[in-house]
Image (tube, rainbow, N blue to C red):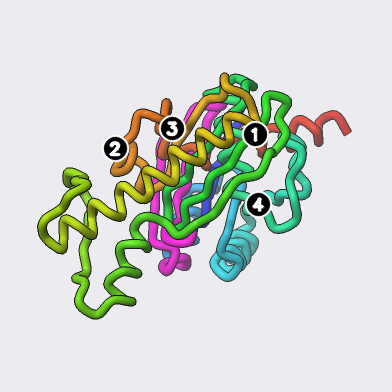
Amino acid sequence: MNILAVNIGNSRITWALFRKGMLIETWQEETSRVEPAARLIAELARTQPVAICSVVPAACEILVNHLAGAGVETHLLSTGSQKLISGTYVGLGMDRVANAVAAWKLFAREAPALVVDLGTATTLSAVSSEGRFMGGLITLGFGKTLAALHQEAAQLPAISLEGKSPPASPLAFDTETAIVSGTILAHVGLIEHWLKLARKQVGGDSVTVATGGWADTLVRYTRAIEHVDPYLTLKGIYLLCEQEAALAGQA
């Protein structure tokens, strides 16, 4: 099965070409630049359908309309229509569903899976060995937490950690190190504590998987994450679309 999988996130639009289940190439653009992204996606989608997962309705509408105008076969995935995992609820983000599916199928091999998505928001999601969504948490993402400290506290400086791996000191002795260390250790503490609590409910043999733009930065400070996959959501989109096609073929 060949598809172009598209994930419209709060900060970035990412898309990937899959051929016969293999991820061939990926691209990305800022979500604020959805129109140029739509043109690129339409150009790539001449020979295969597009499957879309979105948490930004306005950007999704622009993309879907552009693809329709270009005559591209488009599948907009939804939480309620997918059949790979059960136990979802109204309002559950499709990105969390895709992450749960990919972690459960590809990494846990249908054992319990715990997913940590470290993006604009930090989302924590659990799926049982039977493929049932077991719930999770949502909180402000690591980068937005750093930005909020500067925005809400007049004397605290703006700090960017893009491409950096600073040490996290519990006893910092300057303001910048105190901000960075506090934000890192607070986020890592959140992740580790949630994993400990979630394991008690889904089973001790659960597999932990991280994804999202801040995953590479934060996993350096914890041993609680077993796998990191920046393309987890895109792989979940492919699996969901594959299942949808299989069900259509049986109809």
Amino acid type of the residue tagged 3 in the rendering: Ile
Marks 1 & 4, CB-CB < 8 Å contact: no
The answer to whether one can see residue 165 in this image is no
Q: Which residue is mark 2?
A: 221
Quick one: label 1 or label 2, which is nearer the N terminus?
Answer: 1
Q: Which residue is mark 4?
A: 74
Q: Which residue is mark 3?
A: 24
| Residue at mark 1 to residue at mark 3: CA–CA distance | 28 Å
Marks 1 & 2, CB-CB < 8 Å contact: no
101 vs 124, left or right, is right
Q: Is residue 182 above or below residue 202?
A: below
24 vs 132, left or right, is left
41 vs 176, left or right, is right
Amino acid type of the residue tagged 2 in the rendering: Tyr
Residue 19: say if magenta: yes
Q: Residue at x 57, y 30 (%)?
A: 199
Task: Point out residue 54 in the picture as x, y percentages from the top left corner.
Answer: 58, 56
- The answer to which image quadrant residue 130 occupies is top right
| Residue at mark 4 to residue at mark 3: CA–CA distance | 20 Å
Question: Given this view, does label 1 or label 2 mark the residue nearer the observer?
Answer: 2
Question: Given this view, does label 2 or label 4 mark the residue nearer the observer?
Answer: 2
Amino acid type of the residue tagged 1 in the rendering: Val
Q: Which residues are magenta?
A: 10-35
Marks 4 & 3, CB-CB < 8 Å contact: no
Label total for image:
4
